[in-house]
Amino acid sequence: MKVCGVELTGSEAIITLLTLSDGLFDIPDCRQRKFALSNADDQEQMQGFQFAFRKLMEDYGVNTAVIRQRPHKGKFAGSAVGFKMEAAIQLIEGLKVELISSTEIKEQLKRNPLVIDFRDTGLKKFQEPAFTTAYCYLNKQHYAGEPA
């Protein structure tokens, strides 16, 4: 199974692709690391963001996009732009989209810690939250016996 971990920050969607096959994780090369949205009030830009995201998922054969969930209110609440980007991703036809909470990510990392240092993955530091989101989702699927 190939998943795309997504971390929404400000007006950017930071992504990392990750696969799990026969119990082995792999980080495939990807032509893009993030999607930026300069004006979330512009319908054309929102449609462009959604099209570009959908096209990348199709081109790389991604089954599921996994978005790190953000609180709706409080100190660490997500922005309105972030929620609009989340909705645009969720509305992509044919793409399964899952949300995973920070608490669930912490629990998964406690049960199944990363076996390598993140610096050895070849990813950029800003991609670490997206990577751990995808990693924890695949671990959860694998250990739950669900098809991954």
Image: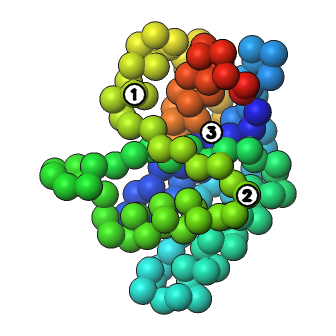
Q: Which mark is residue 89?
A: none
Instruction: Classify mark 1: helix, strand or loop.
Output: helix
- Please tell me which residue is depicted at 53% across the width and 88% down the height of the picture: 43
In the image, is residue 99 above or below residue 89?
above
**Which residue is disc 1 drawn over?**
104
| Residue hosting label 2 | 94
Q: Amino acid at mark 1?
A: Glu
Type of amino acid under label 2: Gly
Would you say the residues marked 2 and 3 are in contact, meaning their CB atoms lie under 8 Å apart?
A: no
Residue 106 horizontal/vertical position (percent): 38, 24
Q: Cα distance, mark 1 to mark 3?
A: 23 Å
- Quarter in which the C terminus is drawn: top right
Q: Say which amino acid is labelled 3.
A: Leu
Please tell me how crowded label 2 is: few (under 14), some (14-19), or many (20+) other residues with Cα within 10 Å.
few
Name the element at disc 2: loop
Q: Is residue 7 above or below residue 100?
A: below
Q: Residue at x 59, y 49 (%)?
A: 97
Q: Is residue 18 left or right of residue 115?
A: right
Q: Secondary structure at mark 3?
A: loop
Residue in front for this viewpoint, 42 or 88 = 88
Q: Residue at x 51, y 36 (%)?
A: 133
Q: Which residue is label 3 attached to?
A: 123
Examine the image and state in which quarter residue 100 appears.
Answer: top left
Residue that protrudes farthest toward the left in the picture: 74
In the image: residue 81, left or right of residue 97: left
Q: Nearer the viewer, mark 2 or mark 3?
A: 2
The tag earlier along the polypeptide, 1 or 3, is 1
User: Can you tell which of label 1 and label 2 is closer to the viewer?
Assistant: 2
The answer for how far apart the CA atoms under marks 1 and 2 are is 25 Å
Q: Is residue 3 above or below residue 25?
A: below
Rendering coords of residue 116 (x, y %): 60, 16
**How many numbered discs sit on the rendered protein?**
3
